Amino acid sequence: MRRPDDYDGVHPLSEEIPVPIEGRLPAVVDPDAADRLTMATERTVLVVVHTITAWNRFQDVLPVFDSDRRIQLVFTFPDAAVISPDLKQYLAAAGAVVVPWEQALRTRFDLALSAHHSGPLQRIQAPLAVLSHGMGYTKYSTGSREPGAGSREPGAGSRDTYGLSAPWLVRDGELIAKAIVLSHTEQLDRLRSAVPEAATAAIVAGDPCFDRLLASTHNRVRYREALGIDDDRTLVTISSTWGPRSLFGSRPDLVASLTAELDLDSYTLALVLHPNIWYAHGAAQIKLWLGDCLRSGLRLIPPDRGWQQTILASDVLIGDNGAVSGYAAAVGVPTVLGAFEYQDVVPTSAIDALGRTARRIDRRRPFPEQLAVHVTDARQQSPVRTLVSSEPGMASARLRIAFYRMMALEPPTSPAPTPPYSPADLSPIGTAATTWWASVTGSTENSYHVRRWPSEPEARRDQEPNRVRRHLLAATDEPRPDLSGLAAIQVADEVLTSAQLREVFDRHPACSMIAVPGPVCRVVRRDGAELLLRTDTGDPLPAVSVLYAELSRGMSWLDLPTTFDVRLGHRMLHAEIVRHSSAR
């Protein structure tokens, strides 16, 4: 759990880090700047970062150089990605030494790494190792690509496997890379078939992201705490890759429907969107599109970090043919598909196994009853897991051996680390719902069941909460006047004077009572009657809903039960009325 005094943003000490002067070469690549260097390193490695997706992957790969003071890393970013954020900003914030692309091409390095295949990589003056930036090589190219152009324009009909076919690996009859890093022998079989001459450059090293996920499973509780949930709730994560056939592209209403129809005390919803969605449309636009959901408890995961922690915290994931869905299934998270386009997926790959074995979400049926089945459904995990990596737990060791051999340097004697993903890197966007529908059932022996749903967005017409008797609770500062005007119960966040109470009632004609939560909750009726309510949890509002429901059914104010129990999701709370007063 993040502490209140945790700094959320650029670390204060970052102001003390020297910033390179614009236009001046970093000292580590400037042949005239030896006197400015402190460490006399033996090898320099160029890391080519095309996209944030590639940057995320390098966080899994670069620990192979951990604690080796003989190595200097230098970063660059080619202008080759169709969709690209301000990579310079990200790299600078990480404290990386960055050189312009054209300068990188003019400089000799001892090793170069790239997690994309776009751009004129053949011009790099170093032994080049190329890696996948996702779960192996699972997708067809979205279109044709002229050699060296670094683009993937849609509509040309190419069926080449991205990163594992001749247009991506060969220039002028020569292999671009000295090492082609694969995660599974299944990919080696496809490489031998597609580009036989490239097989000798292949290295089956396993999947470093999968290894870090396995090394992080013990942090599940801490990840859930960072998301603001405990084991009383089911965490449902929605994941979408990018493009019009993705889940978010083809079913943009699914996030809103799930937000509206999963009750707040049984479920928490998280959303992971591919970075390309963020940077093609803009973060501000994403937040506007999801405004009603973000006001209703949705946890939106930022594009640059946190998705790995989120899937490990999840009880079920609704996804598509993206890598996040594949990794979730591989680590044992029950995974159901909200969309899946077979035409984009290479047969025999791990994502193909996901598409062949995972269940589908049925948009015609209630979501809760489907999720109850999926939470215990693990039938798709085994085939996906076995195709993610041929060397589970060994990626760091395999990559270290390969990279140091390419640099003609003896590797360190200590093993390369596989660091768990940090709970501190999980900072979701969104707020708790402040306006919600409540339904109260049961009154046997003063025991009630309360269910609550967000007031926005709208649920499907034939699904709960539209099919149950309900009432609306709203914060007194609710920004939507239509919802505030419908609320039967207004919830104040501070103690109100008699005049302030009357003003709230006057502004909200539909309001019949005001609740002022606290250690003891004050409940005031429109006619001036009031009571004090105490519960054994920090949330008295479900008990307030019970009182409202009983009054609506005809019970008198003074006949309200003085003690009662409330079931809320998987929890029980006990409530007690400690003082009554009649209308004045």
Image: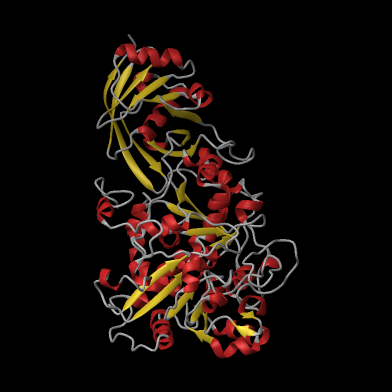
The answer to whether one can see residue 14 in this image is yes
**For this rendering, which residue is in front, 576 or 413?**
413
Figure label count: 0
* Image location (x, y in percent) of residue 386: 52, 79
* Image location (x, y in percent) of residue 322: 57, 63
Give the quadrant of the C terminus: top left
The quarter holding residue 557 reads top left
**Outermost residue to the front:** 32
Q: Residue at x 58, y 85 (%)?
A: 188
Relative to 29, is 104 on the left or the right?
right
Image: 302 above or below 340: above
**Outermost residue to the top:** 584
* Image location (x, y in percent) of residue 223: 36, 58
Q: Residue at x 34, y 77 (%)?
A: 65
**For this rendering, which residue is in front, 302 or 361?**
302
Image: 494 above or below 420: above
Image: 317 above or below 253: below
* Image location (x, y in percent) of residue 548: 42, 26
**For this rendering, which residue is in front, 238 or 289?**
289
**For this rendering, which residue is in front, 530 or 307?**
307
Q: Residue at x 57, y 50 (%)?
A: 367
The quarter holding residue 201 reads bottom right
Relative to 460, is 408 on the left or the right?
left
Q: How is the image coloured?
A: secondary structure
The answer to whether one can see residue 389 in this image is no
